[in-house]
Amino acid sequence: MSVSNSIRDAMVPIHKEGYRFIAVFAAVTVALGFVWQPLFWIGLILTIWCALFFRDPERIVPVSDDLIVSPADGVVSSIGHFAPPAELQLGSEPRMRITVFMNVFNCHVNRAPVRGNLLVSQHKAGKFLSADLDKASEENERHSIVIDGPNGPVGTVQIAGLVARRILCWSEEGQALRQGERFGLIRFGSRVDVFLPEGATPRVALGQTMIAGETVIAAQDDIAPSSMTPTRI
């Protein structure tokens, strides 16, 4: 292995959306250092945190048409049947929903839980309540997408929180997404709701730690283990 490859593998990539924030943090840190040296060290710690927040590491995705992977890093904060938001166009009947809560230390790049064409991509303005509240799904600012997965449509909702003030979704309706492919990002702490297709069974527990694109959150009942093909994305 070459030296350049070793350095590349040791460094965690930063998503391009974070460059300007890191630059601002760094500039303020330098300015604070001229005012009072202890402020420089505080600013340096915050700059490092900002860089870590926008980290975008590659993931090993267990690609399979019968698996649904987590779209976000964080912990599972809710599992149950809930009516999907109207903008998902999935009807009013309750569906199995799994919620992943992200704190300010998690990687915030979101990934497609299944492969398929993007049927719906809708942004809805709203409040900025604490993302761990149930009513945040209905009242908070959010961006909802629906992927036409191999076993039916899968709804994924990026939800803002108390600190989060910006939801990014760069994927567009009609676009084909690979399982585990990056589709968006939320700044700075929030949650993601996943509405499962019929026949999918949750494979996670409350409080379990999720890794976006890697952790399987649900699977079809008749899944064959040999159908999985790990892929680095």
Image (spheres, rainbow, N blue to C red):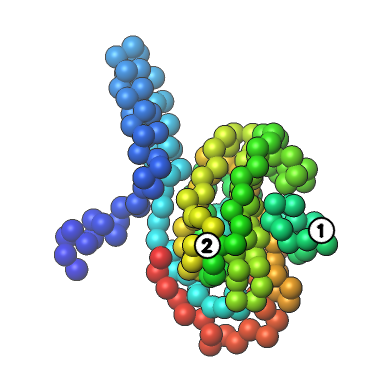
In the rendered view of the protein, which quadrant contains the N terminus?
Answer: bottom left
Q: Is residue 201 visible?
A: no
Which of the 4 image quarters holds residue 225? Answer: bottom right
Q: Work out whether 115 lies above or below 222.
A: above
| Nearer to us in this view, 95 or 4 | 95
Q: Is residue 23 visible?
A: yes
Q: Work out whether 9 lies above or below 151.
A: above
Label 2 Cα crowd, 10 Å radius (few <14 / some 14-19 / many 20+): some
Query: Which percent across, then down, holds residue 5?
Result: 22, 62
Front disc: 2 or 1: 2
* Precedes in sequence: disc 2 or disc 1: 1
Residue at horizontal 61 percent and vertical 45 percent from the top? 123
In the rendered view of the protein, which quadrant contains the C terminus?
Answer: bottom left
Query: Which percent across, then down, holds residue 158?
Result: 61, 49
Residue at horizontal 56 percent and vertical 55 percent from the top? 72
Which of the 4 image quarters holds residue 162? Answer: top right
| Nearer to us in this view, 86 or 105 | 86
Query: Which percent across, then down, holds residue 189?
Result: 57, 41
Residue at horizontal 74 percent and vertical 52 percent from the top? 85
Q: In the rendering, which numbered label is found on residue 136?
A: none
Which amino acid does the dot numbered 1 rest on?
Ser
Q: Which residue is mark 2?
A: 174
Q: Work out whether 22 lies above or below 228.
A: above
Which amino acid does the dot numbered 2 rest on?
Gly
Q: Work out whether 195 lies above or below 225.
A: above
- Give the SS element for disc 2: loop
Query: Which percent across, then down, holds residue 16?
Result: 36, 45
- Give the SS element for disc 1: loop
Q: Which residue is mark 1?
A: 92
